[in-house]
Image (tube, grey):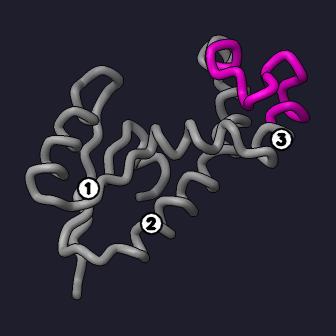
């Protein structure tokens, strides 16, 4: 079976997740959510160790990456944003590609603001 992958992207707060969930639910197809994958990776010990190494102890907690503190740092410094993306982007892409390879439905929805930046 050939599966069609449909990406829904847009700015933060544009309603892309809402739309993706409604479409996926109505069609009974899976939805791969890039934000959810990123959140999961923020708790991955390897990612936490890399964030600690690159940005410092203050940007991690007992449970993972301190998203609020790290966000304030990287959104004000493009070089730091690039460093963070170098940690997360390849891992997100790998997870998405693995999910897509396992698709057993004729359609899969992919939702996220950075679909293009991830090369998806």
Residue 19 marker = none
Going from N to C along the chain, the mark reached first, 3 or 1, is 3
User: Which residue occupies the foreground of this view, 101 or 79?
Assistant: 101
Going from N to C along the chain, the mark reached first, 2 or 3, is 3
| 48 lies above or below 55 | below
**What segment carries the magenta color?**
51-71
* Mark 2 vs mark 3: in front: 2
Image coordinates for residue 78, horizontal then vertical, percent? 64, 24
Residue contact between numbered discs 1 and 2, judged by CB atoms under 8 Å: no
Residue 50 marker = 3
Of helix, strand and loop, which one carries label 2?
A: helix
Badge 3, how many Cα within 10 Å: few under 14, some, many 20+? Answer: some
Image coordinates for residue 103, horizontal then vertical, percent? 34, 73
In the orientation shown, which residue stands out farthest toward the bottom? 1
Of helix, strand and loop, which one carries label 1?
A: strand
Badge 2, how many Cα within 10 Å: few under 14, some, many 20+? Answer: some
Q: Which residue does the numbered mark 2 point to in the structure image?
A: 99
Image coordinates for residue 84, horizontal then vertical, percent? 69, 35
The CA distance from mark 1 to mark 2 is 11 Å
Going from N to C along the chain, the mark reached first, 1 or 2, is 2
Q: Quadrant of the N terminus?
A: bottom left
Q: Which residue does the numbered mark 1 point to in the structure image?
A: 109
Image coordinates for residue 59, horizontal then vertical, percent? 79, 20
Question: For residue 11: magenta?
Answer: no
The CA distance from mark 3 to mark 1 is 30 Å
């Amino acid at each position: 079976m050939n599966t069609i992958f449909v990406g829904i992207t847009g700015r933060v707060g544009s309603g892309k997740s809402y739309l993706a969930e409604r479409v996926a639910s109505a069609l009974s197809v899976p939805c791969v959510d890039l934000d959810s994958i990123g959140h999961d990776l923020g708790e991955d010990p390897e990612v936490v160790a890399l964030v600690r190494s690159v940005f410092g102890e203050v940007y991690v907690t007992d449970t993972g990456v301190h998203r609020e503190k790290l966000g304030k740092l990287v959104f004000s410094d493009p070089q730091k944003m690039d460093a963070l993306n170098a940690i997360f982007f390849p891992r997100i892409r790998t997870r998405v590609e693995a999910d897509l390879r396992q698709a057993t439905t004729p359609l899969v929805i992919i939702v996220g603001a950075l679909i293009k930046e991830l090369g998806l």
